[in-house]
Image: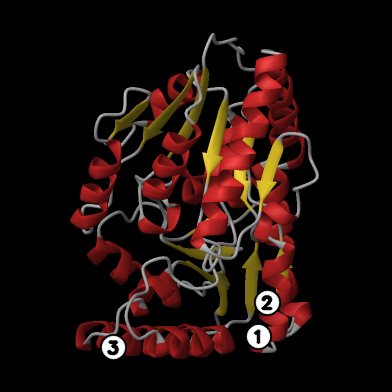
Amino acid sequence: MKVYFFPPTSPFNPYIDNVVAGLETNGSEIVNKNCSNKYAKLLSSFSAMFKHTQIYHFNWIENNSAVDTKKNRLICASIFVWLRLMKIFGGNLVWTMHNKESHFSEGNKEFHYQFMEKLISRMDMILVHASETKQFLIEEYHYPEDQICFVPHGNYLPENKTEKPTQLIHDRLTILAFGMVNRYKNVPLLIRTFKGLELEDADLLIVGKCDSKDPQLKQNIMDELNGEDHIIYDDRFVPEEEVGGIFGKCDIVVLPYDKQSMINSGAAIMAFSNAKPIIVSRFGSIKDIEDREFVYCYDYNTEEEHIRELGEAIKQTYSKWNKNKKILSSEGLEAYNYAKNDLSWNNIGRNIVECYEKISRRK
């Protein structure tokens, strides 16, 4: 089966390459696989139409409507012309719904919501990674249930990896916040919460490049960090070969995300793949696994509640670790086994291809 997958690769997010690998393992031909620059990506879409490509699968194209500007309105209008051409040439349209709305939406969101509604109505199939997303599509957009393909978010493990990660026991509890730093990840709130707990033998390690388009966020973080000895912020993009070493320095990963737009978390799966439990706010895909021992889940409705409940979750973890320094390592191995056994990209790719075949048979 010929598939146009957009984007075909990403230097910042291994998710894309993992999905593509899973599809190829299960017999799909990615017709635009080697297209890296934006011009090649655009031209490859027209080439795909003449190759009788059956599936056109998109990720994050809704981000083009996040801010209502004349430029973005023109881009979004062009997207719908683009999608229409793909349909005319016999293609089936598929979109992965990663978030309820773009993380980058701001100001008046009416245009963004209109784009989302129109985009969803054009899709022959929507791929989701959380049960909540499926219900959201059915209830909010009246999208047909039989056109929704639910598969879990895959792991970040090499397909043939057999050895388990080495688990180090630390004298101090180290909590890691990992990944690109955006507003919806609530890093200033995390720092403020951690400072307020005044834990004697605990450190907070924040690793990830701050959004270069949001200098105020960086300033907010630096203001919160002022004078703190037990919080380290490593503001940089982390190459893949360093990821394992960074996770090896911590005992648990914290994800205090904004619930309004969140559905899935690749950072949570990356933590499991590196044998680490997580402290996480309650949203989307987390609800599907919140009862597992390696998930310390909390809920909130206001910022005040968020600080309080996040603090309680950290204190709960700290108390367990203080009584038994090996407990988080044990839970981390459970998380690793879950990622390895239940979140294989080979199996996920097989399920996606089956969904592709299902919608292709309708024509």
Residue 68 placement (x, y as % from top left) = 29, 85
Question: Which mark identifies residue 73?
Answer: 3
Q: Are marks 2 and 1 in contact (CB under 8 Å)?
A: yes
User: For numbered disc 3, what is the local secondary structure?
Assistant: helix
Question: Which mark identifies residue 136?
Answer: 2
Residue 316 placement (x, y as % from top left) = 67, 33
* Residue type at tag 3: Arg
* Disc 1: which residue: 140
| 301 vs 139: above or below | above
Q: CA distance from mark 1 to mark 3?
A: 24 Å
- Does residue 129 appear anywhere in the picture? no
| 106 vs 331: above or below | below
| 332 vs 363: above or below | above
Determine the residue positioned at 32% across, 86% down.
78
Residue 185 placement (x, y as % from top left) = 44, 52
Q: CA distance from mark 2 to mark 1?
A: 6 Å
Labels 1, 3: front one: 1
Quarter of the figure with the C terminus: bottom right
Determine the residue positioned at 76% across, 34% down.
341
Q: Are marks 1 and 3 in contact (CB under 8 Å)?
A: no
* Residue type at tag 2: Phe
Quarter of the figure with the N terminus: bottom right
User: For numbered disc 2, what is the local secondary structure?
Assistant: helix
* Residue type at tag 1: Glu
User: For numbered disc 1, what is the local secondary structure?
Assistant: helix
**Disc on the earlier residue, 1 or 3:** 3
